[in-house]
Amino acid sequence: MLCLAIAQASLAQNDSTEKQKPKFKLSINYNSHLNYYGRTDSLKSTGIFPLAELWLSKDVYVNVAPVFVNNAVQSMAYAGTVTTLGYLHTSDKWITNLYVLKPFYKQSSQLVQSALKAQAGASFSKLNKIVNITLGGDVKYSDRIDFGATTGVDHLIRKELRNNSALVIDPSFYTYAGTQNFTNTYYKKRPGNILFPGSTQQINENVTKFNVLAYEFSVPVVYAKGKWMALVTPSYILPQNLVTIVNRPDLSEKGQNLFYATVALKYTF
């Protein structure tokens, strides 16, 4: 999403005067393999989500996205709605992105990210002709608070076409990190004596670690003409440090190196 924001902001840089007034944008989006930092459900779900965006000013927006899931056991099943309030400011050298996100997932949702109750974050991208550098951080709230960090590099390629349209290609590499919470179980042997034999005690410790969660390569491609915008983002994500629990696959994280794509068509009213 960060590199898509950079690519779309590049298309909007020459439109700063027009975007001073409120705008409404509507898009339909498709994801070929829903995942959360490479973590997936066992059904390999795809997702379709319409997205309504209200830009209150050039930089401030509110959006709403209901999420529909498709897999082997359900078709176009409503999983929940994600709402976002954000600030996205673009200059010649910087892109500043601030947001607060509130999802409303159904209790029966099987999405890996359905435990998320709220999230807030910020990212700052330094732009130049050779490579853009992005640093970001976030706070997530579920049944506890988790912290995340993002670093990324990308290279924007923009081409103005003859029919008053534009094409942006943005090869990108991102690293995602964050806290992980799990229970570490081990056994401790207590020594005995003449009167009382020794014993083995099970010890459970709650552990919190800050780890790399995933590496991701992507190539967002954005084509814009008039009020229409088409977006295609092929991505390859490599999840890291999956939490596994011995003899409990139902409680272990599922994930593997994964190729997926996001396709969208957007119209500005």
Image (cartoon, helix red, strand yellow):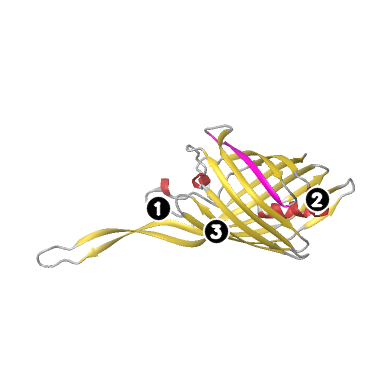
**Is 176 situated left or right of 107 in this image?**
right
Label 2 sits on what residue type?
Leu
Residue most extreme to the right: 162
Residue 37 in sight in this render: no
Viewer-nearest residue: 38 or 139:
139
Name the element at disc 1: loop
Circle nearer the N terminus (3, 2): 3
Q: Residue 162 carries which label?
A: none
Q: What stretch is highlighted in magenta?
A: 59-72
Circle nearer the N terminus (2, 1): 2
Is there a contact, CB below 8 Å, between mark 3 and mark 1? no
Quadrant housing residue 47: top right
Q: Residue 167 carries which label?
A: 2
**Is 147 situated left or right of 162 in this image?**
left
- Residue at the disc numbered 3: 148
Label 3 sits on what residue type?
Gly
Q: Residue at point 76% right, 66% down?
A: 130
- Residue at the disc numbered 1: 245
Name the element at disc 2: strand
